[in-house]
Amino acid sequence: MMEILHFEFMQNALAAGLLTSIICGIIGTLVVVNRIVFISGGIAHASYGGVGLAFFLGLPVLPVTTAFTLGAALIMALVTLRARERADTVIGVLWASGMALGIILLDVTPGYNVDLMSYLFGSIMAVPRSDLPLMAGQAGLVLVLVITFYRGFMVMSFDEEFARSRGVPVNFLYFLLISLVGVSVVMIIRVVGLILVIALLTIPPFIAEQRTRSLGSMMTVSTLLSVAFTVSGLLLSYLTDITSGAAIIAVASVCFFLSFLLPDRRAH
């Protein structure tokens, strides 16, 4: 099995997978405990508009998609804070609008020859080495910001009203969290595609939540699970010649259902 590591595309895929696993473990945990899975799904699908914009303008996909996704994420954050009763409707509209914009822009792009499936279901095997430094920078930025504001995130995640009463800048942290979700989503799309983003962002934290007692340990276990799912899925994809993103989520899903058979350690 070790011979597959001699291929550059597999080395790049593993590096991208490991970087993404760090993101999934950290941000996925905050997504789950703050119950913002629906918002994360909206951000993921709206990001397709950034993909279309990048190809339409002939610019690098990763930075353009990141900027576009951050814009969409901040709009969703503003709406959920200012008009919570209408948030699900607005998020749904942005979700659909982003995808529609991306498809239209790709349709009108001269010489368009992009593989749509690679963005919908992931193309980790095709991640170029030139993307890895930017992905590492994004992962590093997320890690530094979460460590810096860890105590605030922890208090906000478990009791928002208490956090406000203690002077924690909840609104600022919420905008920061949604922005980090936007950055993370762009990275995860490269691995499993925008349709499967939510699965990789939520399955490892869900399993970890059942067996940990603190936010930090939940992040750690979730990261390790993400690494295991990604590496196993990559190997499965290589051996069976199936889509890598789907293979990773298949492994994660099997473990998700098996986790219900194991005892909940928090009960002890």
Image (spheres, rainbow, N blue to C red):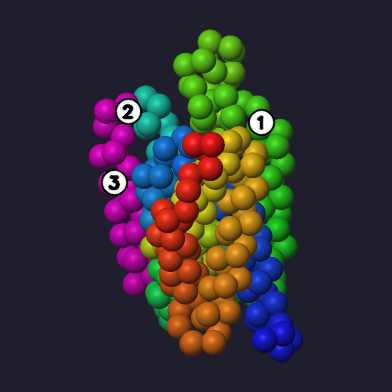
- Secondary structure under tag 1 reads loop
- Secondary structure under tag 3 reads helix
Q: Is residue 40 above or below residue 105?
A: above
Q: What range is drawn magenta here?
A: 83-109
Which numbered disc, 2 or 3, marks the residue that appears first in the sequence? 2
Decide if residue 136 is on the left or right side of residue 78.
Answer: right
Which numbered disc, 2 or 1, marks the residue that appears first in the sequence? 2
**Circle 1: residue type:** Phe
Q: CA distance from mark 1 to mark 3?
A: 29 Å
Q: Is residue 253 above or below residue 28?
A: below
Q: From the image, tell me which residue sits under label 2.
A: 84
Residue 256 sits in which quadrant? bottom left
Considering depth in this image, is 161 or 123 the residue closer to the camera?
Answer: 161
**Circle 2: residue type:** Arg
Q: Is residue 119 above or below residue 77?
A: below
Label 2 neighbourhood size at 10 Å, few (<14), some (14-19), many (20+)?
few
Label at residue 92: 3
Q: Position of residue 162 (x, y in %)?
A: 51, 15
Question: Which residue: 40% across, 75% down?
Answer: 117
**Circle 3: residue type:** Gly
Q: From the image, tell me which residue sits under label 1.
A: 149
Considering depth in this image, is 23 or 256 the residue closer to the camera?
Answer: 256
Q: Position of residue 218 (x, y in %)?
A: 59, 43
